Image (cartoon, grey):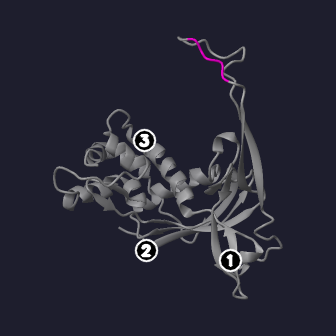
Amino acid sequence: MTIPAITWAGTLTATSSIAHDGETRGMISLLRREQIIQPDSSIALVPIISGNSVRGRLRRIAEELLRDILQYEGHLTPSAAHALRAGGSLTKVAGEPLSGSRLAAIRAHLPLIGVFGTAAGGRIIDGCLNVGKLVPLVTETDHLTGHHSALSAFSIVQAERYTRLDDSNTHNFPITSEPNPAPAETQMLFQVETFMPGTTFTTQITLLRPTELEAAFFAAVLAQFLARPRIGGHLAIGLGHALAHLVPDTDPPAMDWAKWLRSHRKQAIDALAQL
């Protein structure tokens, strides 16, 4: 049984600065920007976070949930692992591309593939997930979002500086098997343009005609993301933290997806072997 659609809509607010690399100029990585036509027909450049950034984070959460349930560590081919974790790659295959009953088995027993899609088995497998861009609530987007903001696109960004010191000749550097040539002490300085903490974004996430299994599985994935949202790059040094409030327009099914997958583990592992 399929569900026509479920859409989660709402806002995310940065609790730490957020980086989303668009281009690099010299030693500074700039935010990704888009041109937006204003009500007076002028054009404004507005920093916007692509839906692909959030989608990638959701996919990694989904793969970890699926791994915990199916316990497929050590049973996957490299191509299957890439298909689940990173969307795979389109390459030539020795036999026939995935189709028919083999493709149906993959969709039926691997909700991650049904939701996110992948490239595997010599074909592109479409998913049912659409992730919207994160549009900041600023004066330049008021006419698109329906919100009113006193902040401009220029006022919500900043440049953060970071340094990296080559300390390979300091006292606590590990002893190496060969003599370690002492480099000149150099300190690299780089800058990242970021959204300021407190910046609020609006977005929406939609599942189009998911099965009950896919919808229940993705609801669990999204719940884990919303409990601890992480967005953009440089997460290891404290960037990308947020608070999220996304509400579905239809309640997801109450199906126990984890129990169903455990009871169909063999079929799911066999389906993974096709990727």
Q: Nearer the viewer, mark 2 or mark 3?
A: 3
Q: Is residue 9 visible?
A: no
Q: For this rendering, which residue is in front, 70 or 149?
A: 149
Residue at horizontal 45 percent and vertical 46 percent from the top: 63
Q: Is residue 63 magenta?
A: no
Q: Which residue is mark 3?
A: 67
Residue at horizontal 38 percent and vertical 69 percent from the top: 2
Horizontal side of 224 relative to 1 (left or right) equals right
**Label 3, residues with CA under 10 Å away: few <14, some 14-19, many ≥20:** few
> Where residue 155 is drawn, which disc sits there?
none
Of callouts 2 and 3, the N-terminal one: 2
Of callouts 2 and 1, the N-terminal one: 2
- Counting from the top left corner in percent of width and height, residue 141 is at 70, 76
Residue at horizontal 81 percent and vertical 65 percent from the top: 155
Q: Which residue is mark 1?
A: 145
Q: Amino acid at mark 1?
A: Thr
- Counting from the top left corner in percent of width and height, residue 270 is at 25, 45
Q: Nearer the viewer, mark 2 or mark 1?
A: 1
Q: Is residue 104 visible?
A: yes
Q: Which residue is mark 2?
A: 4
* SS of the residue under disc 2: loop
Horizontal side of 57 relative to 134 (left or right) equals left
Residue 222 lies, with reference to residue 247, above or below; the image says above
Q: What range of the chain is rendered magenta?
A: 179-183
- Counting from the top left corner in percent of width and height, residue 179 is at 57, 11
Residue at horizontal 73 percent and vertical 38 percent from the top: 163
Of callouts 3 and 1, the N-terminal one: 3
